[in-house]
Image (tube, helix red, strand yellow):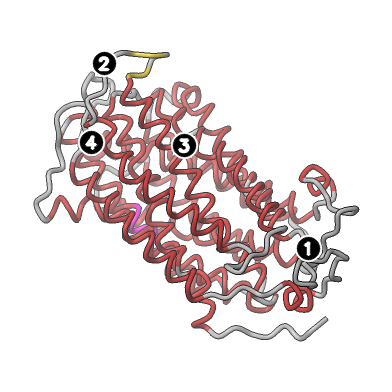
Amino acid sequence: MATQRDLTFRQMVDLSFGFLGVQIAYALQSANISRIFATLGADPHQLSFFWILPPLMGMIVQPLIGKWSDRTWTRMGRRKPYLIVGAVIAVLVMLFLPNAGSLHFSTRVLLGLNMAMWFGLFSLIFLDTSINVAMQPFKMMVGDMVNEKQKTTAYSIQSFLCNAGSLLGYLFPIFFTWIGIANEAPEGVVPDSVVYSFYVGAAILILCVLYTFLRVKEMPPKEYAEFHGIKMADQVGHDGEDVMPGHDRASEKGLFKLLVDAPKTFWTVGLVQFFCWAAFLYMWNYTNGAIAVNCWGVDMAVEGAAASAGFQAAGNWVGVLFAIQAVGSILWATVLPRFKNVKTGYVVSLLIGAVGFASVMFLHNQYALFVSYFLIGFAWAAMLALPFTLLTNALEGSPYMGSYLGLFNCTICLPQIVAAATGGLVLRLVGDSQPAMLLMAGIYLVVGAVCVRFIKK
């Protein structure tokens, strides 16, 4: 096995810089989807169902992207072709999604949804799919090109850029409102402050992705094999060189076989992921309604509540709170590498985040919520960095790194699907209280922290 050279700090930043733009798109989606669909006419019990489709598409797309990119080599690179295709599609969808209420669809209702909501729903499917396609290559390139001792640093840089992108995406609506762009619109129409946020986010997304695409040069197959200590497969391309390290036609594994052979770390970290991502699905889904009720006194049971000035003001404030969360994540990401034991850092982060979630239910001052979401950011920073550090270290030397990272994304998507599918039921069990759903999120993080003890490095 060849010496695994160190990357410079600049090289590690270049490797993940496009993640900044991708995360702006993801932040706009996560902070505004409930607001958009509530504006289009969805009631609170329907909102959780709209959140099923994004993780469902992630479960389908990300393992395929991992498997295909493991077998890909082009002049552009191994992971980069998928990166650029996903970014281009995401940009196109971001131009259409926020206009779902402005395209003069008929008022016809199909399966309980008006046509504007159906258009928004299909746009959301394409947006989340394309974001998944663009996002996954960044995680894979760190696994491909960074040695074991630098991975915590590299994923922490990625976490920092991710949260910086979130910070921008979350603040766009309130910034545009501040400079005079309308934050209210006729019933059923998304305000211009949100529409312009998606436009600007789309522009930044493509510029950031192009930067990484042009700056990063992926390893050719032989160099990759030497770097990871993988035997080159007996598979020859047109130029006489091996096409892909570690793969041959006879021994290539399918996704199901890879799951069967997955290291124990895959499953134990996945258990922690289940509770963590269910908690954050509740945050994205119910924060808007929770603070509209607690801080603006909006009665969400009243027809037309989503078109009220209070609900739309709360929608802008969601962006501010999520930005505070991103600040907490950015700062905590600089602390995580200082923990000598990765599992200790994981537990501490999740427990602090649980305190933040639980406190939301009891606070009625919009500024006091800064503390809550700052603490929630600690858990988010750990979730972005530590699971991938633990897993990629366990997979060192495997020719199926991309496939496993794609499959690992199911531990992010499945809990969101379960939480979304059962969200309406849980909401009824807590007395239709959206603030109480944030308390439930805190309980989930505590359970996740307990499950960290099962992880074996």
**Looking at the image, do the residues carrying marks 3 and 4 touch, with CB atoms under 8 Å apart?**
no
Q: Give whichever of discs 4 and 2 has the lower sequence position.
A: 2
Label 3: how many Cα within 10 Å (few below 14, some 14–19, many 20+) = many
Pick whichever, 273 or 201, lies toward us. 201
Instruction: Return the residue found at the far right.
Output: 250
| Residues at marks 4 and 1, CA–CA distance in whole angstroms | 46 Å
Secondary structure beneath label 3: helix
Determine whether the residue tagged by mark 4 lies in a helix, strand or loop: loop
Query: In the picture, residue 217 is in which quadrant?
Result: bottom right
**Label 2 sits on residue:** 107
Mark 1 element type: loop
Identity of the amino acid at label 2? Thr
Tell whether 255 sits left or right of 76.
Answer: right
Element type at mark 2: loop
Marked residue nearer the N-terminal end (3 or 4):
3
Image quadrant where one finds the N terminus: bottom right
Kind of residue at disc 1: Pro
Magenta stretch, residue numbers: 322-328
Quarter holding the C terminus is bottom right
Q: Which residue is mark 1?
A: 399
Residue located 84% across and 50% down the image: 261
Q: Earlier in the sequence, mark 1 or mark 3?
A: 3
Q: What is the x, y in percent for residue 202?
A: 33, 54
Instruction: Please state which amino acid type lies under the numbered disc 3.
Output: Ile
Image quarter of residue 29 = top left
Where does label 3 land, which residue?
125
In whole angstroms, how far apart are the C-alphas of marks 2 and 1?
52 Å
Tags 4 and 1 touching, CB below 8 Å: no
